[in-house]
Amino acid sequence: MSTDRFAPGVRVRTRATDPAGHTRLPRYARGAVGVLVEQAGRHPLADDRARGVPADPQPVWHVRFAAADLFGTGDHTVTVELWQDYLTPIEEAL
Amino acid sequence: MSDDHGSSVISAQVRHVESLLESRGLLDAGEIDTRIDEFLAGGSPANGARIVARAWADPGFAERLLADANSAIREVGLSMAGGLQEQRLKVVANTEAEHNVVVCTLCSCYPIALLGPSPGWYKSEAYRSRVVRDPRGVLAEFGLELPVGTSVAVWDASAESRYMVLPRRPVGTEGLAEDELAALVTRKGLIGTAVV
């Protein structure tokens, strides 16, 4: 996957699965659609570090969600910081 | 969301490793507590208040702070490098249109090196689980009723960045000096559970 598919403004869907070990993808933000706000550096995936697995740094993103998309209610936004591995860009319909 | 760590397997393992290191002379008894005390000694909400006061007094600084907080806070002699590695600081500004509030839903991530230890309620399961779902309700319990026209942005410190809120400058403070402005800023104001 080309990394330039990830850029501010791109809509992404988060991973929906519940991994067996440590993860930094909060349960409430799984399988949800949000928008990339900005990149917040590069870091090894926390899931791998927690298991002692070697991991190369990868982009970490601020992803903004509408509360209604996460909880079915609410007019606020929630911005979560997520490793790129958790995210899949959504291709916009032309 | 993680459970209480006090009696977990990992804390028992940490205590075991600590005692092994001590028994082999690699670590002095109490050395970790000393290091933690040193780490915390420089951290205080007064640091955040100084940053906010400078931002209120100097629009150019405010702009640099919002663009790259780690660089900007060095202008007032502060740093996020108090720990083992420098953490990224993201400062988010309250406006008439949007109010920001910070949480760590996974544990209790907080800019400790800058602001000192977080308040107890910040680490409580009630705050962590509820503020992402119903920030207006939680803020109301803190005594903060936001105008209907003000939207709420919640920031979950779920990875490596740490967050601080830049509160709005109170009206009627035009004549105040920076240290007088700093005295108005509260820890809750820096987290977003109060306005200044």
Image: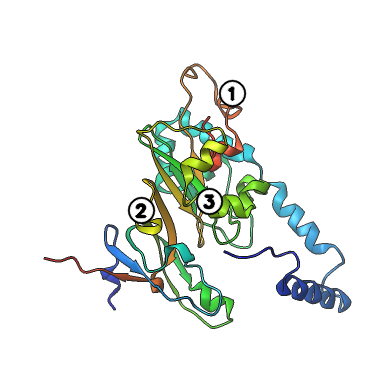
Residue closest to the eye, A84 or B81: A84
> What residue is disc 3 on?
B130
Is residue B71 shown left or right of residue B30? left
Q: Residue furthest bottom?
A: A53
Q: Which residue is mark 1?
A: B180
Please state the horizontal and vertical placement of residue B38, each as a whole percent of the image: 74, 53
| CA neighbours of label 2 inside 10 A, class few (<14), some (14 to 19), many (20+) | few
Q: Chain of mark 1?
A: B
Q: Are marks 2 and 1 on the same chain?
A: no
Q: Which amino acid type is shown beneath numbered disc 3?
A: Arg
| Numbered circle sitting on residue A68 | 2
Q: Position of residue A51 (x, y in %)?
A: 58, 80
What is the secondary structure assignment of the residue under circle 2?
helix
The amino acid sitting under disc 1 is Glu
Q: Give the amino acid at mark 2.
A: Ala
Q: Secondary structure at mark 1?
A: helix
Q: Nearer the viewer, residue B108 or B74?
A: B108
Dot 2: chain letter: A
Q: Residue at 41%, 54% (x, y): give it.
A: A79
| Residue situated furthest front in the rendering | A72
Q: Quadrant of residue A50?
A: bottom right
Residue A43: assigned label: none
Secondary structure, mark 3, is: helix
Q: Nearer the viewer, mark 2 or mark 1?
A: 2
Residue sitting at 59 percent across and 23 percent down? B180
Q: Residues within 10 Å of mark 1 (few under 14, many from 20)?
A: few
Left or right: where does residue A92 sit relative to residue B84? left
Does label 3 lie on the same chain as label 1? yes
Q: From this view, report whether residue B80 is shown above or below residue B143.
A: below
| Quarter of the picture holding the N terminus of chain B | bottom right
